[in-house]
Amino acid sequence: MAITALYTAATGMEALSRKIDVIANNIANADTVGFKSSRANFQDVYYQVLAQPGVQTSENSSSPLGTQLGLGVAVSNTQLLMRQGSPMQTNRSLDAMITGDGFFRVELPGGATGYTRAGNFVRNSAGELVLGNSEGPRLVDSPTIPEEIPDQEVSITSDGRVVGTAADGTQQEFGQLQLARFANPSALIQAGANIYLPSGSSGEPIEGTPGENGLGTILPAALELSTTEAVTELVELIKTQRVFQMNSQTIESADQALQVVANLRR
């Protein structure tokens, strides 16, 4: 009956509304350093089986097909798309970009460790490297850089060494940065502020020196741009809007059919 179509189309509108939410977040973060876009994945839901296929219809024959009515759609999950973002040269010595697999490790309140692809680092009052966001978490393995060495004389090498040049021209190595990667990075939890947290599906972090054990290397004086592709997201937004409208028209058609049925009693 048309009442089934009402509920089925309603599930479509709800699922597509969730997809619009995901697209909106992708577009909003088009300029967020290290941001990884997401996509909404759909799955069909339960089916009402009115007639089973293969049912015996006579002594020598059986039904080749059945009658199954789908009851709509649901968002199965949202998936992080861990693509490599484009590099943006900043010519700022404390900026760093990971090319390849891996995340920077930062300390979170309470002692937990967060993971980020953003590499816009600054020095705090103690000379340690912290992430340049609203919370400023400290790098887990941050060295302490002497205050007499200016930022422009500090650099991060491709293998994660933090080195600086003193006033007399001598080079000093202050520390070694480590990266972490995950078996399933698409399952990381998005905590906001460019921070990811591990989940039961992401696997345990695999830590190591940049360039080793499958970890990427570091591109100094550069940042990784957001992986949001504005044109692609706008196309998806338009398509989703049109399908949403089609579902609303299905509801209108089902409602009109029910009105015709109701009028038959008059």
Image (spheres, rainbow, N blue to C red):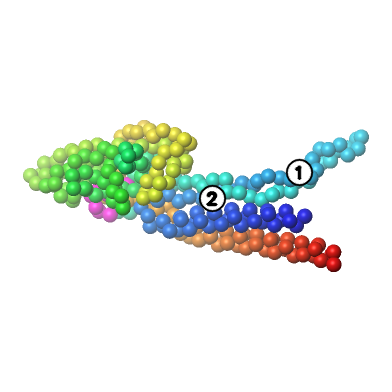
Classify mark 2: residues with Cα within 10 Å, few (<14), some (14-19) or many (20+): some
Assess whether mark 1 and mark 2 are in contact (beta carbons under 8 angstroms).
Answer: no
Q: Which residue is mark 1?
A: 49
Indicate the position of residue 104 as horizontal and vertical percent values: 33, 42
Query: Which of the labelled discs sits on residue 7, or is there none?
Result: none
Residue type at the position of mark 1? Val
User: As rendered, which of 115 and 63 lies closer to the eye?
Assistant: 115
Viewport quadrant of the N terminus: bottom right
- Reply above or below: 256 against 40: below
Q: Which residue is mark 2?
A: 40
Q: In the image, which residues are magenta? A: 90-97
Is 91 covered by the magenta stretch? yes
Which residue sits at x=48%, y=58%? 24
- Reply above or below: 86 against 128: below
Residue type at the position of mark 2? Ala
Is 205 covered by the magenta stretch? no
Return the residue found at the far right. Answer: 59
Measure how far apart labels 2 and 1 are at the Cα level: 28 Å
Examine the image and state in which quarter residue 157 appears: top left
Indicate the position of residue 20 as horizontal and vertical percent values: 53, 57
Secondary-structure class at tag 2: strand
**Image position of 4 (left or right of 75):** right
